Image: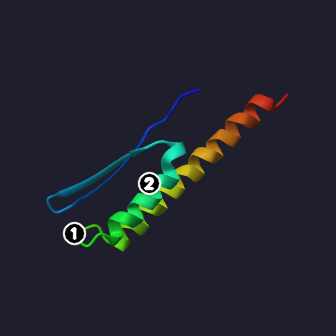
Amino acid sequence: MTHELNVLALVKDTERYIFLYDEESASALLRTLGQYASDKDLSFTWYDAAVLSQKVRRLKEEADAEAREQWSRQTTW
């Protein structure tokens, strides 16, 4: 079994937000995005958090669908 690492990045002017996460830490990343959005010292907005959260969820759905497809191929007689 492979352990996949995901990279999520946002560039805003001279700032760069780069997040590395795996499937097990996706929910922690979603919480972090909310914390960053509520931090007034960062340029990271709630819109940024929403867009990146949507991307995390979409990647998880795609990975789940691929895993189901692989499992289906393995169990087909």
* Of callouts 1 and 2, the N-terminal one: 2
Give the residue displayed 14% in from the left and 59% down from the top. Answer: 14
Q: Work out whether residue 17 or residue 35 is closer to the camera in this orientation and state it.
A: 35
Looking at the image, is 72 positioned above or below residue 12? Answer: above
Task: Tell me, for residue 29, which label it has, or none.
Answer: 2
Q: Quarter holding the C terminus?
A: top right
Q: Is residue 25 left or right of residue 20?
A: right
Q: Quadrant of residue 24?
A: top right
Picture coordinates of residue 61, whole percent (x, y): 59, 52
State the residue in front, 37 or 73.
Answer: 37
* 25 to 48, vertically: above or below: above
Please rate how many residues cluster around mark 1, counting C-alpha atoms within 10 Å: few if below 14, some from 14 to 19, many from 20: few
Q: In the picture provided, is 33 more to the left or to the right than 40?
A: right
| Percent of width and height locating residue 54 | 48, 63
Circle 2 sits in a helix, a strand or a loop, which is it? helix
- Relative to residue 3, is residue 34 depicted above or below? below
Q: In the rendered view, does 68 fall on the left or right side of 46? A: right
Find numbered disc 1 in the image and state the secondary structure of the residue it sits on. loop
Structural crowding at the residue carrying mark 2, measured as other residues with C-alpha within 10 Å and reported as few (<14), some (14–19) or many (≥20): some
Q: Residue at image x 62%, y 42%?
A: 66
- Which of the numbered marks, if any, corresponds to residue 41? 1
Along the horizontal axis of the image, is 35 left or right of 4? Answer: left
Compared with residue 64, is residue 51 higher up or lower down, i.e. above or below? below
Amino acid bearing label 2: Leu
Residue at image location 59% in from the left, 26% down from the top: 1
- As drawn, which residue projects farthest toward the left? 14
Residue 3 in percent (x, y) is at 51, 31
Disc 1 versus disc 2: nearer the observer: 1
